[in-house]
Image (spheres, coloured by chain):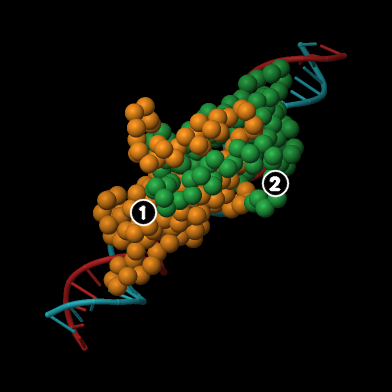
Chain colours: A orange, B green, C cyan, D red
Amino acid sequence: METLNAAELLAALGHESRLGIFRLLIEAGPKGMHASAIGELLAMAPATLSFHLGHLSRVGLIQGERESRFIHYKANFATMDELIAFLTRNCCQREQCLPRTVCCDTTDKRRGRAKAGEE
Amino acid sequence: METLNAAELLAALGHESRLGIFRLLIEAGPKGMHASAIGELLAMAPATLSFHLGHLSRVGLIQGERESRFIHYKANFATMDELIAFLTRNCCQREQCLPRTVCCDTTDKRRGRAKAGEE
DNA sequence: GAAATCATTCGATATTATTCAAATTATGGA
DNA sequence: TCCATAATTTGAATAATATCGAATGATTTC
């Protein structure tokens, strides 16, 4: 991933509403969510929601698929993985950061979801 | 880290110039860099550079310290670590992403810096 | 203290993002 | 076909960001 592309993804997530949408879709997993369900949960006007969904789609962080009258959105895990990989590769300089603490410790944490002492 | 705070950090990095500055400071390691050196490398006008350095400082991604006539900036590794931890915890949903590939594989990659097949 | 250097702040401008009501498109059912 | 529902697009107002020349503040050197 190049810097320009990474900046686009970061900017897309760098807005409270969009980050909220994205987290919701991550929570929802591969089954995704209808746009209206997102809008209701986050109390967003339809037009505003569409604007942000469009932004997230354009950069490839989510994707929507029509399903009868609804549009089903789901997070694009691969894109997010690439972004994290980019940050991990470019955020650290050998021993100056804590790669193991952050990187290899998280799988268990994630599986357990919010153990003691987190956040 | 909360969503609002994470969004702030992501937005700060979600600009090509600022991401470029940050990567440069990561490369520079804990010894950091003078503002003028950054400006020269990235071909930025002093006022523009100050604007972006101010933004990155405000959110805690970098910090500057006066050193005679110069101001020495360095990346704040801890903040970046927290951000990556936030994304890692909130970007994945159990087996749907590739935690090991991204997370535990990168330490070696990082130490080797850009082996074959990367990026 | 004056001049030189490094960096920030100010000010003005240009550009881009955000919001949302209203209109439009798409689909399913009576 | 007509109506209801889901979502997007349009359009227009507002707000936030980005850029950079010029002025200012800080510090060193002569």
The circle on residue B36 is: none
Residue C17 or residue A12, whichever sits in front: A12
| Image side of residue A102 versus residue A108, left or right | right
Report whether residue B109 is seen: yes
Q: Determine the chain carrying the residue at label 2.
A: B
Name the amino acid type tagged 1: Gly
Q: Which residue is mark 2?
A: B115
| Image side of residue A93 versus residue C4, left or right | left
Is B103 located above or below residue B67 in the figure?
A: below
Label 2 crowding class (10 Å Cα cut-off): few <14, some 14-19, many 20+? few
Picture coordinates of residue B14 (x, y %)?
54, 45
Label 1 crowding class (10 Å Cα cut-off): few <14, some 14-19, many 20+? many
The quarter holding residue A31 reads: bottom left
Quadrant of the image containing the C terminus of chain A:
top left
Distance in Å between CA atoms under marks 2 and 1: 33 Å
Is B12 located above or below residue A77 in the figure?
A: above
| Residue positioned 38% across, 67% down in the render | A65
Residue C18 or residue B75, whichever sits in front: B75
Residue B46 or residue A33, whichever sits in front: A33
**Residue at disc 2, secondary structure:** loop
Q: Count the marks.
A: 2
Report whether residue B35 is seen: no
Picture coordinates of residue B114 (x, y %)?
69, 45
Picture coordinates of residue D20 (x, y %)?
68, 43
| Residue positioned 75% across, 37% down in the render | B40
| Image side of residue B4 versus residue C4, left or right | left
**Residue at disc 1, secondary structure:** helix
Q: Which residue is mark 1?
A: A29
Name the amino acid type tagged 2: Lys
2 and 1 marks on the same chain: no
| Residue positioned 39% across, 48% down in the render | B93
| Residue positioned 72% across, 20% down in the render | B69
